[in-house]
Image: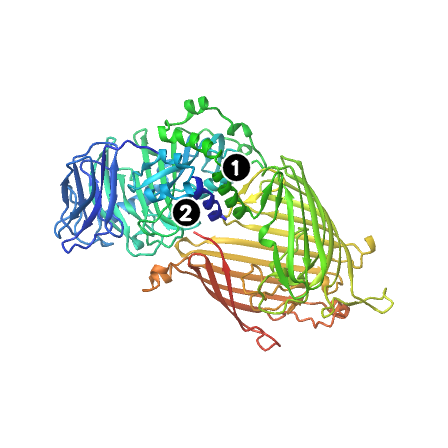
Amino acid sequence: MKIKSLYILFLFFSITIIAQTKVSGVVVDEKNEPIPFANVYFKNSTEGVITNENGRFYLESTKSHAFLIASFIGYTSQEIKLEKSVTYNLKISLSEGETLREVVLISGKMPKKNNPAIDILRKIWARKKQNGLRQFQHYQYNKYEKVEFDLNTIDSNTMKSKLFKGMEFVFEQMDTSKITGKTYLPIFINESLSEVYGDNTSKREKEILKANKNSGFSSNQQIIAFIKDLYADYDIYNNYLKFFDKDFVSPLSRTGIDVYNYALTDSMYIDNKWCYNIVYYPRRKGELTFKGDFWVNDTTFAVKNINLAVTKSANINWVKEIYIEQEFEVVNDSVFLLKRDHMMSDFAFNKKEESKGVYGKRTTLYKNYKFNEPKSKEFYKEEVNFIDNSVYSKNDEYWSENRFEELSKDELGVYKMLDTLKTVKKFKQMYNLVAILGSGYIQKGNFDFGPIFSTVGYNDVEGIRLRAGGRTYFGQNDPWRLQFYTAYGFKDDQVKYGVSGKILLNKKNRLILEGGNRRDIEQLGASLTTTNNVLGRSFASSGLFMAGANNNLTSINLSTVSLNIEPVKNLTLETGFSYRTLKPAWDRFSLDYFSSDSSTGVESEVKQSEITLSVDYTPKRKTIGYGVERSTVDSPFTRVFVNYSQGLKGVMDSDFDYQKIQLYFKQPILVGGFGRLNVITEAGKTFGEVPLGLMSVVPGNQSYFLIENTFNNLNFYEFVTDEYATLQLEHHFLGRILSRVPGLRKMNLREIVGIKGVIGTVSDANRALNASGLTYLAPEKPYWEYSVGVGNIFKVFRIDCSWRGNYRNLPDANKFAIKGSFGFYF
């Protein structure tokens, strides 16, 4: 999860800009009330800011300026002479009257009709496909990217705190932010050089990393990938800009006139091009919007530069501010291409002005544009598992010659500071603690103990369950790995265990051989779609808190061996063989079936050999690492999984011959400013006669927590099928509704609605085989349930209320349920 990586960055994470003019203050009206979203800028320049919701501003320039101008629609603009190069806590009072800058282009309110700013906006929409890279079939350019993290709001108490005892030397790198005016301490820097190629006709793009360097963590691909995902690329001409998995309405979007106020405030020459200045700010609080201004050319209607700042009232966690600057250069007198992109985020636990946090800053420079030099389709084909370690080992001389702009003295100092900091025992202890909380493992040499979050469990058969285990770990790109665990239940007085190993046979196409054995107690009715993960275990098997009895458990002895390959990026093919025995974990639960081979006519244990073939396709999935195991970046992606199983009767004394086909499909859909819709469907059918232990049990949820792909109002084994289809729809509005309710707006709550359904049958032959005492009930008439939830409670909790739509008269039917979940989300 992204927020875990942020914890690491909070602990050890400069840019020094020699500013000639600094000014901060507040803009108020005649009644001394603050004026939010007022325009403040240096006279005869394009350098300016928009005041925040409290009317406050901070403005800094590397040039010397003698006058400051403040203005707002419906007020007379105010010109202030700056007596000093640094002026703090300036109070500017505006009186009602004529509007705005020296060139007055609009006055009064900001209506949608007869507003010249919106007239210009419509021309931007009409021409946006003719601006920038869109107008070329093929393009390429060089890119330099610099990402920094800084501890901010540093004061004397911070410097004297016990946290930094023995590490006081880090404060020698302190500086002041050009954007907020707050002190900060640089703690991390990452630089990269890339070549980017694009084909607009086929909508393909490829980025080739040429060099990468960072302070202290050059071998940690997880931090590098986290940074890349945290600061995803965006296009200001798109209707929505995605940051932290949320869609912010672009001020240049066609829907912008419904959520923004626009005002045309000035015009002037910029790089010999006549441009208009448009100021914009939100119509309502609580929505995912920006405030700021942009300059646009009067003939091409291409944006020359733009500033975007997210307001503090926006419904987003852990982020106090987001500030973006983009500057475009003019090529061939009419082509506007991105030259510089700067984004700063202020990560903090709360949004109070005095709260401490971490600045995350990304600066990207572009140059050497070339056009209409086509590349082949093979060129754009993405490598499955490629890594060039040489890009992480470029020397200082290479960087001095190739980075697009020189690092400041303090930025260079970050590299030295981190090298020194890593030798400090206290810092290493803090780093190790955060690493344990983030990964769940305690590393000792080349072995990891854990995961620590699975140490204690409970169910009605085992009682209190203790688990211990670990894995080999030489690095995140290990070509092989061994894992094991052992567990003990105090009630059943039995020892369980699991062991598995895997090896990467071919790095290029990720050909992996793996196998293992597990003897344990599990809840079989916890999922529909099966996998061959020998050490996988559902929360339903040993959750500490359950809403109902958890005693219909099965003792399983499972051995597997499999071979999988990834011939195309994010397409995995797998074949495997497994042998398992299943028997009830206690005498009040039965898996019995009628058998002519048994002397009693009934068997209670299932012995089964099986071969499987599966296809797993996950387009646009982002992964970290190149070894036998990889981590998935926490971002939504589509998944299509198809599995075929063949039972082998007689092989290793196996009992049944059958065929099973299963399909799983998940599709997250971003619905613009209305949030995200998650669609999940599963379907499957078993051909042949099988007992209860091999049936498809509709997964219930008897815990107090939300579990994906389960039904909240169903008990374990309430529905049993050999043919089924499910559909789950869950929409996250991300606060769009509750943000408009007075009294709830400041709580930043987020609404979730959902509906789930399943239909299925059981064949007569399988009913006749059943001797378990459990009456098979299949949802031949579709079962459905619906839910309403509220998320982001105290930023970490979600609670859902769900109702059973039908089958309400069944014995012990759960008509209403309340489930919760914890998590850290933006």
Q: Which residue is mark 1?
A: 220
Q: Give 547 or 728, whichever is nearer the viewer.
A: 547
Residue 243: which disc? 2
Amino acid type, callout 1 = Asn
Measuring from the top left, give residue 247's x and y in whole percent: 40, 50
Closer to the camera in the image, 331 or 10: 10
Q: Nearer the viewer, residue 355 or 114?
A: 355
Number of the label disc, if any, that sits on residue 27:
none
Q: Is residue 300 left or right of residue 489?
A: left
Residue 145 versus residue 548: which sits nearer the camera?
548
Judged left or right of residue 249, residue 813 is: right
The correct choice, above or below, for 795 with respect to 222 in the image is below
82 in relation to 659, above or below:
above
Q: Quadrant of residue 65?
A: top left
Amino acid type at mark 2: Phe
* Label 2, residues with CA under 10 Å away: few <14, some 14-19, many ≥20: some
